Amino acid sequence: MWSTIGEAGEFGLIARVTAQFPGTGDVILGPGDDAAIVTAPDNRVVATMDLLVEDRHFRRAWSSPEDVGRKAVAQNFADIAAMGARPTALLVGFAAPPDLPLSWADGLTEGLRAECARAGGAVVGGDTVAAETITVAITALGDLGGRPPVRRDGARPGDLIAVTGPLGLSGAGYALLEAGVLGPDDARRLVGDSAGGADPGWAACLREHRRPGPPYAEGPRAVRLGARAMLDVSDGLVQDLGHIARASGVAVDLDSAALVPDPALVEAAALLEQLGAARRAPVEHMLFGGEDHALAAAFPPGTDLPPQWRRIGTAAAPGPEGAVVTVDGAPARAGGWDHFG
């Protein structure tokens, strides 16, 4: 029996992986031919793509292959949802060393399958190739269902700025991993019983970093609520809202009183301080932490937001400093993720 993907070979690996992916009503022809065929009932297709590179976006010592698979789907389908669309299909490119255990590829496949089941899309094809570094490249497709797309350039002065989904947990989870905390056992080894029991609250930050859970259904809902601009919060709230501000020609002012940290984030910040990591207040994780995959949007004044959406600020006409992001009127410092920074 095969133990590595090199032993399975390209076509053995493809057959093994594709057998695990069920079809959906969006798939006319799935894996196995020269190309897939996917329905496009809206006559428009929303498309995006992203990469996960080992030791840049994930580390095998930190994340299981299932984690990597789920994260690969989440970060792409979150972009589909941010346009106001429904996820429909994925194409997966997979590069890896031939000596990679076949069990790792099986785990990745299970993660892809499980997150597609949660989001509503399906894997319809892709490619595999040998490489020195594991890389997962995803192309994601979505359907607008007759709705207008929500771009970044539609915010207007007076709009409500709101978010749905967690803020800061993933960034705090990354900081914990960097500090050597892969789970509760590591924390107790480093700081003793004060780290908490078998499933302490701060562990939610690790889970959110490894397996983000974007609020997919809230993208189309935001369109129905009248959202005028929206994006996926992946590089930090301040940095990403800056994209809306510049594209729309507005200033965005955040209300610090509305930025209420999740209890798990408060616990994580306290643990990081015990560990001697660089001190960062919970709200700083919310403002500058990356890979949240929450959705942030601008809604017309007076919009009756459902409980899933939390108002955190207001759009205004730009002042002398231009289209910037401020907190309680004071310019927010620069911060957030930059792949080349």
Image (cartoon, rainbow, N blue to C red):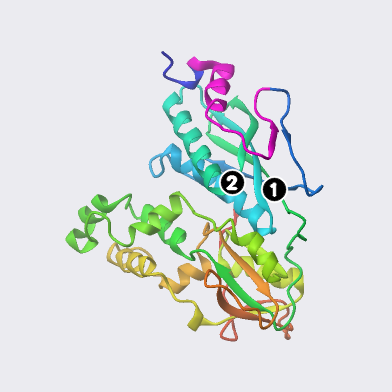
The label number, if any, that marks residue 142 in the structure image? 1
Residue, x 67% and y 76% (percent of image)? 324
Q: Residues within 10 Å of mark 1 (few under 14, many from 20)?
A: many
Residue, x 69% and y 59% (percent of image)? 84
Q: Is residue 244 left or right of residue 254?
A: right
Q: Residue furthest front?
A: 25
Q: Which residues are magenta?
A: 7-32
Instruction: Tell whether position 282 is magenta.
Output: no
Q: Quadrant of the N terminus?
A: top left
- What amino acid is labelled 1 in the image? Gly
Classify mark 2: helix, strand or loop.
loop
Classify mark 1: helix, strand or loop.
strand
Q: Is residue 203 above or below residue 4?
A: below
Q: Quadrant of the C terminus?
A: bottom right
Q: Residue furthest right?
A: 43
Q: Taking the image as drawn, is residue 54 in sight?
A: no
Q: CA distance from mark 1 to mark 2?
A: 10 Å
- What amino acid is labelled 2 in the image? Gly
Q: Residue furthest top?
A: 1
Front residue of this view, candidates 303 and 173: 303
> Label 2 belongs to which residue?
120
Q: Is residue 251 left or right of residue 205?
A: right
Name which of mark 1 and mark 2 comes first in the sequence: 2
Q: Is residue 202 left or right of residue 88?
A: left
The label number, if any, that marks residue 66 in the structure image? none
**Does the CB distance between marks 1 and 2 fall below 8 Å?**
no
Q: Residues within 10 Å of mark 2 (few under 14, many from 20)?
A: some
Q: Position of residue 156 (x, y in %)?
A: 75, 78
